[in-house]
Amino acid sequence: MSNNNTIAGWVLAGGIAALGLSIVSGKYFHAGKHERPEVMGYVIEGVEAAGSGADAGPSIETLLQTADAGAGAKVFAKCAACHTIDQGGASGIGPNLWNTMGKPHGHVAGFAYSDALASVEGNWDWTAMDAWLTSPRRYANGTKMTFAGLGKAEDRANLMVYMNAQGSNLPLPAAPVVEEVADAAAEAGAAEEAQEAVEADAAAAEE
């Protein structure tokens, strides 16, 4: 009986020692690392997790070349709860957006803009509007605008073209030269491959 108690005691002591070592090693290897969730807890419309590569495709300048105002009108439905865009329309929670593109920030007379937005220098050009539509709070920290933003570059391009057609007619920005050169190189490569294929077929026919 004494031997059994001794063995049980050693087994219990060994288990406690192993547990202690496990805890200590866990704290050592996790030292300096902050516990954080790997993904966002929930998804907010228009917001994408950092690093998701939402705009990893063509540049906004490129997308604007083929943007669709009709599609932009549908995107504007997300804005219609706070904004009007018809000529002479009244401001609501947000200012009337008729003839906005190309105008200075805070240009609608009588509308109470936040100091954060009114203090932003420059005009609503394509770059500024794209940044604003991506994230109003990041563009003008402290803005009263509560909309989270549009995560899809295609939606922003379509919306801007639609807004531009409502009294502004701001010239589209030029497509990036780098992309044009890449397209030309791809077309040249395809033409060269086609020519080589024709020559190869001709040589095979002669044989």
Image: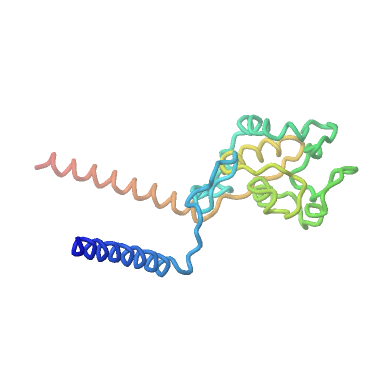
Tell me which residue sits at (19%, 45%) in the image. 200
What is the quadrant of the N terminus in the image?
Answer: bottom left
User: Compared to 163, does 24 lie above or below?
Assistant: below
User: Compared to 77, does 149 lie above or below?
Assistant: below
Nearer to me, 90 or 149: 149
Q: Is residue 30 left or right of residue 92?
A: left
Q: Is residue 187 left or right of residue 12?
A: right
The quadrant where residue 75 appears: top right
The quadrant where residue 70 appears: top right
The chosen color scheme is: rainbow
Tell me which residue sits at (53%, 52%) in the image. 50
Q: Position of residue 3 (x, y in %)?
A: 18, 64
Q: Position of residue 100 (x, y in %)?
A: 77, 42
Nearer to me, 20 or 111: 20
Q: Position of residue 23 (x, y in %)?
A: 39, 64
Q: Is residue 103 left or right of residue 1?
A: right
Tell me which residue sits at (82%, 32%) in the image. 87
Nearer to me, 164 or 36: 36
Q: Residue furthest left?
A: 207
What is the quadrant of the C terminus in the image?
Answer: top left
Q: Residue furthest front?
A: 1
